[in-house]
Image (spheres, rainbow, N blue to C red):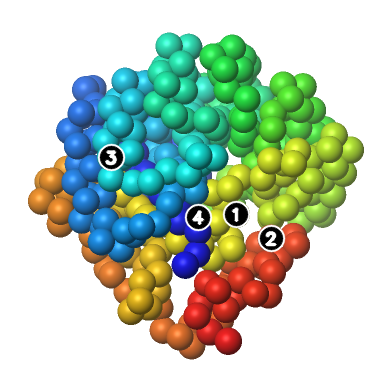
Amino acid sequence: MPPLSLYIHVPWCVKKCPYCDFNSHTSPQSLPQKAYAEALIADLQADLAWVQGRQISSVFIGGGTPSLFSGQTYQDLFGQLRHYLDFADDCEITLEANPATVEHDNFEGYLKAGINRLSLGIQSFNPQHLQTLGRIHTQQDAFNAISLAKTAGFSNVNLDLMHGLPNQSLEDALLDIETALSFNPTHLSWYQLTIEPNTAFYRQPPTLPDDDILWTIQEAGQHKLAQAGFLQYEVSAYSQQRPSKHNLNYWQFGDYLAIGAGAHGKVTTPEGIFRYRKTRLPKDYLAAAPLQQARLGLEKIAPEDLYFEFMMNALRLKDGVPIDYFEQRTGLA
């Protein structure tokens, strides 16, 4: 069987960014943290038959803005998750955090829950670019969040950065990288802004740098990161000997359970390899999950499609995927 990960989706944000096409919704004044955590457990219970006897190698809590939930909520949630799932001793557990929604006490609470990796959505340190991107945090919020994470005891921190932004120069893009490197993160996600359907930017497209500028930024940024010891292992991922286990499992065609509103999963069973998704709208999810009825669209991947599915993921990795993984993870020779 392939390695098994767990994806948990928290669908609420303070404000939806104009470039975001993820399943995120403006948060109510009072977040239903307890009810949502209980729904996640019921959702998991509906899928447990697929993964009996298998160990969880990584967990990723994405959104939305998972850092809107308290440390205590995650301590209670993971206490329940560990009752049902076998977590590897070296399990990587990542939580996405918005710099505007973090507090020292919550960071300490996340650590107590077993969360051992943070992914901070910085996107840019430039105040003008932050405003253009519709981010709710400031440059100082970003500085504070990184410092708070380290003070709380996180030793594995990813910083998300974007490039190819409206009115962004080469100097702007490189300064973002230099600023990020000054905090000594273990991992950087550095990806180009793309305009996706069903976003505010799609409805009113901003003017982006032309292809020549984008290529210059890409080459110069990769060079600067390499000089700092950050090796590119995936299209937009760079690390100092600590690549994301969770991301690698995606690209190496591993399995991943998915719980939470709009979450997507993939599981290997004796009957074949299946993809599925969960009810998208938070209100509908909160109604369906306690009844173990949140799963939608269970679809078996046809054997003839497995070649494409495998390669579509593998080609994101700089080093590709070992050839024996193909047979191990597709069942095809």
For image coordinates 39% across by 26% down, the residue present is 113
Camera-nearest residue between 43 and 91? 91
Residue type at numbered disc 2: Leu
Which of the two labelled residues, at mark 1 and mark 4, occupies the earlier sequence position? Answer: 4
Residue type at numbered disc 3: His
Q: Can residue 80 be seen in this view?
A: yes
Camera-nearest residue between 104 and 115? 115
Residue designated by label 3: 83
For image coordinates 71% across by 66% down, the residue present is 320
SS for callout 1: helix
SS for callout 4: loop
SS for callout 2: loop
Residue designated by label 1: 248
For image coordinates 72% across by 21% down, the residue present is 183
Query: Mark 4 packing: few (<14 Cα in 10 Å), some, or many (20+)?
Result: some
Which of the two labelled residues, at mark 4 and mark 3, occupies the earlier sequence position? Answer: 3
Which of the two labelled residues, at mark 2 and mark 4, occupies the earlier sequence position? Answer: 4
Residue 172 locus on image (x, y percent): 77, 32
Q: Mark 1 against mark 3, which lies toward the viewer?
A: 3
Camera-nearest residue between 191 and 285? 285
Left or right: 164, with 145 as reference point: right
Q: Which mark is residue 196?
A: 4
Q: Mark 4 against mark 3, which lies toward the viewer?
A: 3
Residue type at numbered disc 1: Leu
